[in-house]
């Protein structure tokens, strides 16, 4: 009995249709998917690249001061006028030569004003520690210089070398 039941046909447009005309198509609007919105207070913290905190959307950012030196020939750091250019050494082993070459490359990169922002004292300090530590310090200097957060690269290098020496002494004391 069900096999003989009439098949439902889709409704056709009323009225005469020309032979080349297309039938009207009825579009059903799609239901909108429900979005779950998490309150801002319960959102997981998101780290922004570069270690800076992520700001909520629509936050107003106010910059105080320019953060830049007064001009292209402005002094960098407190003793910029007294800087001694790094004295290039010959006869260094390969890794110390790499440290010296990277210091030269950073000086010529123009990340900071002046002809030799990394001076003789910075090179001497870097050559006094293990080459891996020295290269790591120079990579940090390059990152901070590219980000514009480092004003005196020589002072940073001297301080980093001093801190690494103190850490090494502390480890030796703890082991002995």
Image (tube, rainbow, N blue to C red):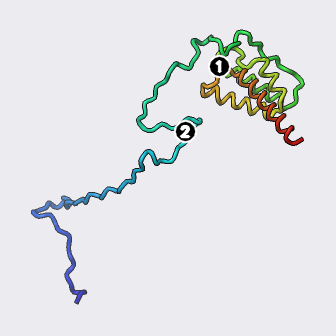
Percent of width and height locating residue 68: 57, 18
Percent of width and height locating residue 93: 88, 30
Q: Report the quarter where the C terminus lies.
A: top right
Answer above or below: position of 2 versus 167.
below
Pick the residue in front: 68 or 170.
170
**Badge 2: few (under 14), some or many (20 or more) residues near its Cα, within 10 Å?**
few
Viewed as shown, does residue 66 lie left or right of 13?
Answer: right
Q: Which mark is on residue 154?
A: none
Viewed as shown, does residue 15 lie left or right of 106?
Answer: left
Which of the 4 quarters of the picture holds residue 15?
bottom left
Dot 2 falls on a residue whose secondary structure is loop
Q: Which mark is on residue 48?
A: 2
**Which residue shows up at 79% across the image and 17% down it?**
120
Dot 1 falls on a residue whose secondary structure is loop
Q: In whole angstroms, how far apart are the C-alphas of marks 1 and 2?
A: 25 Å
Which of the 4 quarters of the picture holds residue 41?
top left
Pick the residue in front: 85 or 91.
85
Viewed as shown, does residue 156 lie left or right of 123?
Answer: left
**Badge 1: few (under 14), some or many (20 or more) residues near its Cα, within 10 Å?**
many
Q: Report the quarter where the N terminus lies.
A: bottom left
Q: Which mark is on residue 112?
A: 1
């Amino acid at each position: 009995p069900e096999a003989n039941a009439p098949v439902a046909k889709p409704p056709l447009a009323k009225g005469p249709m020309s032979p080349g005309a297309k039938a009207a198509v009825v579009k059903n609007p799609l239901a909108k998917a429900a979005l779950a919105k998490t309150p801002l207070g319960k959102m997981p913290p998101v780290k922004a690249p570069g270690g800076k905190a992520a700001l909520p959307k629509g936050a107003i950012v106010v910059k105080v001061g320019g953060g830049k030196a007064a001009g292209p020939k402005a002094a960098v750091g407190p003793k910029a006028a007294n800087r001694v250019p790094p004295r290039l050494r010959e006869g260094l082993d390969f890794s110390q030569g790499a440290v010296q070459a990277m210091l030269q490359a950073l000086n010529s990169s123009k990340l900071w004003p002046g002809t030799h922002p990394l001076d003789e004292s910075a090179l001497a300090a870097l050559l006094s520690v293990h080459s891996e530590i020295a290269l790591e310090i120079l990579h940090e200097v390059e990152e901070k210089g590219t980000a514009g957060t480092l004003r005196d690269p020589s002072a940073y290098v001297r301080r980093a070398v001093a801190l690494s020496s103190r850490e090494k002494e502390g480890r030796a004391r703890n082991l002995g």
